[in-house]
Image (spheres, rainbow, N blue to C red):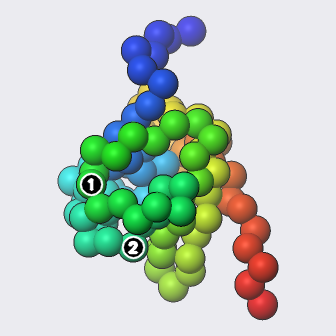
Amino acid sequence: MTEVPEDFLRLDAWLWHARVAKTKGACARLIEAGGFRLNRQPVTKAHARVRVGDVLTFALGERVRVWRVLDLGERRGPASEARTLYEEIAEGQG
């Protein structure tokens, strides 16, 4: 097992691991543009700390996504690996 030095990851790095955008810089720009919430609190800093159990709310495409962080990840792997980093929380949208 690879050692993880911290129990958190920068939000931009976590989004990159989760394959939200193609580059870490693009993830940072999405965050800085606004529209992200971390545990219901607005966040515009790419260096915000993400921990296992946190809830992210953000718009992706035309849908609002609500994800619970299940793992921090160690790298940007294939999409199948990225999907193991979070679970989509079903919202009562009609």
- On screen, residue 40 versus residue 75, left or right, reads right
Can residue 33 be spotted in the picture?
A: yes
Outermost front residue: 41
Q: Which residue is mark 1?
A: 45
User: Mark 1: which secondary structure?
Assistant: loop
Decide which of tag 2 and tag 1 comes sooner along the chain: 2
Instruction: Please tell me which residue is depicted at 27% across the width and 54% down the height of the picture.
Output: 45
In this picture, is 33 found above or below 56?
Answer: below
- On screen, residue 48 versus residue 93, left or right, reads left
Q: Give the camera-side residue of 42 and 24.
A: 42
In this picture, is 55 found above or below 2?
Answer: below
Q: How many marks?
A: 2
Can residue 83 be spotted in the picture?
A: no
Residue 7 point in image, percent of width and height: 48, 24
Q: Are marks 2 and 1 in contact (CB under 8 Å)?
A: no
Q: Give the camera-side residue of 69 and 84.
A: 69
Q: State which quarter of the image contains the C terminus.
A: bottom right
Instruction: Please tell me which residue is depicted at 74% across the width and 84% down the height of the picture.
Output: 93
Instruction: Please tell me which residue is depicted at 68% across the width and 59% down the height of the picture.
Output: 88
User: Mark 2: which secondary structure?
Assistant: loop
Q: Residues within 10 Å of mark 1 (few under 14, many from 20)?
A: some
The image quarter in which residue 33 lies: bottom left
Q: Residues within 10 Å of mark 2 (few under 14, many from 20)?
A: some
Instruction: Please tell me which residue is depicted at 42% across the width and 20% down the height of the picture.
Output: 6
Q: Amino acid at mark 1?
A: Lys
Q: State which quarter of the image contains the N terminus.
A: top right
Residue 72 point in image, percent of width and height: 51, 34
Residue 3 point in image, percent of width and height: 47, 10
Q: Give the camera-side residue of 94 and 73.
A: 94
Q: Amino acid at mark 2?
A: Gly
Q: Which mark is residue 53?
A: none
Q: Which mark is residue 35?
A: 2
